[in-house]
Image (spheres, rainbow, N blue to C red):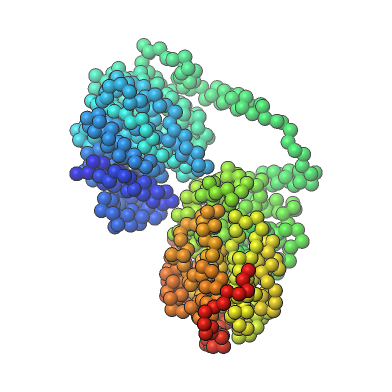
């Protein structure tokens, strides 16, 4: 029999669940069982729970056949519990390190009380951690254990189940269970504290209470918040059946009214049209449960008066007055804008008042570099599978020729037509953001494609990495996330990462990367044409060199001496150098180094090459879909880890051969290891993990989901074994490109270094 049964219900929390479970299993106190309850979650929660249960015998997996809600899910976990104490933990929260050991010590010290109440801290997406402000009742001074009557101020601590450890036999003896509906903690915690014969406190933060920006149940606008009335009815019914508890009615009544006011005044909870109805319900409960003989504290009288009389409009006037007082000190004047910009914004506001156009879609990419990437592939898919929808593409002034003829309508950012499309198009697709002034309308669908599979840390994970984040306004970024409806993902790694580092209410479409569809559709003739357009000599081995941006360097100096590398490898090798901004012309010169940094289509560069040489660029995940060799150069791995960090050790799980120095890189190409059997095995494992959906129909799946609003009826995924990406020119020729490469007869010289 374990000391603790930690019960974790899970529903739509795949991005946070692993962190939660790890915080339990990683405790220094190991005498526990972890009961993880999958409340019929539609995401990967069930799979994650099963994976944990398979590798740790302390984990019990419980799968409910239908979604029942937080309360019944906790009950299901309690029914399986065998521990001395029940500890409830929400699946997006975490246990603090050594929390269970501190609980066990305090329980032993106080003689196994019925209930142990411990403290918590709120954690925010921006890294802040704020401890519970009501700390006085948590003191460990004085007699312990005690009863609630000895410390009634304990009722002012947040009434939730997850800040208490309850003795399991005590819970079973009294038959405590969680009811269905929202605010299920209310009719559990009040009766538990009132019935306990012995209570102890632990003045220590044991739970980190995640303040989710989006997706929190109680932060969802819904009529389900009316459930709070039934929950307090259950509390007062419990007290009414036990005359010895009648003395608690005034305190419970004050807590109830405060709770109602909190729900009513939070803008994110009640639908606007139901606010007056909610206040009428609160008024009815006020009259039902009020004890007329009790005098209210002065601070509470105004709130109780407003609830008692259901003064909905008065409430609104008081809140407006408070808002005016808060904004009064702010400067009224703003920086004057140019007359033309002001006119365009006015035009935009006018367009926002006009009807939305369901047959319009607007697309764009970061930097407006041309028609391409995932937005470009989706735009083509819209024209192919939804020809009734007219598409437009945002471009920089003077770059309208970047849009293919016969394709979408090009729109300059600084034009009235662009702002009209932004205001009235139903579908908005981008891999960055259209404009900070975007006011997303009801009915608009904003699709965020991101920019590939993440290797380096992103989003909120950059908050403690100033070299990579620089002057990023994370609050502004999160406001942009609030407007996303869908986010594209190519694999489970991306899904779990995006949902954690870009927390929001969006839906993740894990269907693959649309831009990679081209790799399955292209032909050998396309490869030949692209190589000729780039000036790649016939019969040569084309290395696509794509280095990543170094956050720790102010100037992006070349990491490799490409001229030296090519001298060592001989005339058969050519480098397509995809230089970074600021590196133009610095990667080397000569007929065998072709600078393709300004080329608008990286997909075309991939098709034209025979092998990818990179360090930490996310392009490796896309290139793996081509099933062509990849070589990774990791000479400054420690510096990159320190500046940005990565989500996994690329050296331990690479897509091909790994070179730690320039000489090792030369050796890999000179000896043929770059395309050897070991390299192929590594690439196969890499593809299996990161390319499960890229079968050539990712864009079609996304478009059909957007149009139908659901996932049913989408094209089935072609398994990796059944895919036939277009081969490289070297592979298609059937000749080994190493046939005429001179092989080194001795140790590689180190001359000609950088």
Question: Foreground residue, 167 or 56?
Answer: 56
Question: Which image quadrant for residue 256?
Answer: top left
Residue in front for this viewpoint, 668 or 107: 668
Q: Position of residue 631 (x, y in %)?
A: 52, 72
Quadrant for the N terminus in the image = top left
- Give coordinates of residue 324: x percent, y percent: 63, 26
Q: Is residue 345 above or below residue 556?
A: above
Q: Residue at x 33, y 26 (%)?
A: 140
Q: Looking at the image, which is closer to me, 449 or 597?
A: 597
x, y (%) of residue 100? Answer: 31, 40
Q: Position of residue 662 (x, y in %)?
A: 56, 71
Residue at the spot 79% in from the left edge and 44% down from the top edge: 338
> Would residue 117 appear left or right of 699 to someone viewing this image?
left
Along the horizontal axis of the image, is 643 left or right of 61? right
Q: As displayed, is residue 523 above or below residue 40?
A: below
- Residue 549 placement, left or right of 709: right
Q: Residue furthest right?
A: 339
Specify whether residue 489 is in view.
Answer: yes
The C terminus: image quadrant? bottom right
Give the vertical position of 516 relative to 102 (above or below).
below
Identity of the residue drawn at 38% across and 38% down: 207
């Amino acid at each position: 029999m374990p000391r603790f049964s930690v019960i974790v219900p899970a529903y739509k929390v795949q991005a946070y669940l692993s962190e939660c479970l790890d915080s339990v299993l990683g405790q220094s106190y190991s005498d526990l069982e972890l009961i993880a309850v999958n409340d019929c979650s539609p995401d990967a929660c069930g799979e994650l729970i099963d994976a944990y249960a398979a590798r740790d015998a302390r984990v019990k997996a419980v799968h409910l056949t239908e979604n029942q809600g937080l309360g019944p899910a906790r009950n299901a976990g309690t029914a399986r519990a065998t521990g001395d104490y029940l500890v409830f933990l929400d699946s997006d929260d975490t246990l603090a390190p050594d929390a269970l050991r501190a609980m066990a010590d305090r329980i032993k010290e106080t003689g196994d009380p019925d209930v142990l109440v411990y403290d918590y801290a709120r954690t925010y997406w921006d890294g802040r951690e704020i401890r519970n402000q009501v700390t006085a009742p948590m003191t460990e001074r004085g007699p312990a254990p005690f009863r609630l009557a000895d410390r009634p101020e304990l009722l002012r601590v947040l009434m939730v189940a997850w800040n208490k450890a309850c003795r399991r036999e005590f819970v079973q003896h009294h038959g405590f269970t969680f009811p269905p509906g929202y605010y299920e903690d209310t009719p559990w915690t009040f009766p538990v504290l009132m019935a306990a014969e012995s209570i102890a406190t632990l003045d220590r933060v044991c739970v980190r209470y995640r303040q989710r920006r989006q997706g929190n149940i109680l932060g969802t606008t819904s009529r389900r918040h009316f459930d709070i009335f039934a929950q307090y009815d259950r509390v007062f019914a419990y007290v009414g059946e036990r005359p010895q508890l009648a003395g608690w009615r005034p305190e419970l009544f004050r807590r109830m009214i405060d709770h109602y006011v909190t729900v009513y005044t939070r803008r994110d909870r009640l639908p606007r049209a139901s606010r007056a109805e909610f206040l009428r319900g609160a008024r009815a409960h006020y009259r039902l449960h009020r004890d007329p003989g009790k005098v209210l504290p002065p601070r509470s009288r105004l709130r109780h008066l407003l609830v008692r009389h259901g003064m909905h409009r008065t409430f609104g006037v008081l809140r407006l007055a408070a808002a005016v007082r808060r904004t009064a000190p702010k400067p009224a004047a703003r920086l004057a804008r140019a007359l033309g910009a002001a006119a365009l914004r006015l035009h935009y506001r006018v367009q926002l008042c006009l009807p939305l156009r369901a047959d319009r879609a607007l697309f764009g990419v970061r930097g407006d570099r041309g028609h391409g990437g995932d937005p470009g592939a989706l735009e083509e898919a819209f024209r192919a599978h939804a020809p009734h929808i007219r598409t437009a593409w945002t471009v920089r002034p003077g770059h309208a020729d970047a849009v293919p003829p016969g394709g979408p309508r090009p729109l300059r950012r600084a034009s009235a037509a662009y702002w009209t499309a932004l205001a009235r198009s139903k579908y908005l697709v981008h891999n960055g953001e259209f404009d900070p002034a975007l006011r997303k309308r009801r009915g608009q669908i904003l699709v965020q494609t991101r920019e590939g599979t993440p290797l380096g840390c992103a989003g909120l994970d950059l908050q403690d990495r100033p070299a990579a984040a620089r002057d990023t306004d994370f609050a502004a970024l999160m406001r942009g996330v609030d407007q996303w409806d869908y986010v594209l993902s190519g694999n489970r790694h991306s899904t779990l990462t995006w949902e954690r580092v870009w927390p929001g209410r969006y839906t993740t479409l894990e269907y693959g990367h649309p831009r990679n569809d081209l790799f399955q559709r292209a032909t050998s003739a396309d490869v030949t044409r692209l190589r000729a357009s780039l000036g790649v000599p016939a019969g040569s081995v084309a290395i696509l060199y794509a280095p990543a941006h170094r956050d720790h360097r102010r100037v992006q100096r070349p990491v490799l001496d490409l001229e030296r590398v090519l001298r060592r490898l001989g005339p058969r090798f050519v480098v397509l150098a995809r230089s970074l901004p600021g590196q133009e012309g610095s990667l080397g010169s000569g007929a065998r180094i072709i600078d393709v940094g300004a080329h608008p289509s990286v997909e075309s560069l991939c098709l034209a090459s025979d092998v990818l040489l990179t360090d930490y660029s996310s392009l490796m995940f896309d290139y793996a879909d081509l099933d062509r060799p990849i070589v990774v150069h990791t000479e400054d791995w420690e510096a990159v880890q320190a500046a940005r960090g990565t989500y996994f050790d690329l050296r331990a799980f690479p897509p091909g051969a790994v070179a730690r120095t320039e000489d090792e890189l030369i050796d890999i190409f000179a000896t043929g290891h770059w395309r050897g059997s070991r390299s192929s095995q590594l690439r196969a494992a890499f593809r299996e993990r990161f390319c499960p959906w890229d079968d050539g129909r990712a864009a079609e799946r996304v478009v059909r989901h957007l149009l139908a609003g659901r996932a049913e009826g989408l094209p089935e995924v072609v398994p990796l074994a059944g895919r036939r990406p277009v081969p490289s020119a070297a592979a298609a020729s059937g000749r080994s490109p190493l046939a005429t490469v001179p092989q080194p007869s001795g140790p590689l010289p180190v001359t000609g270094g950088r």
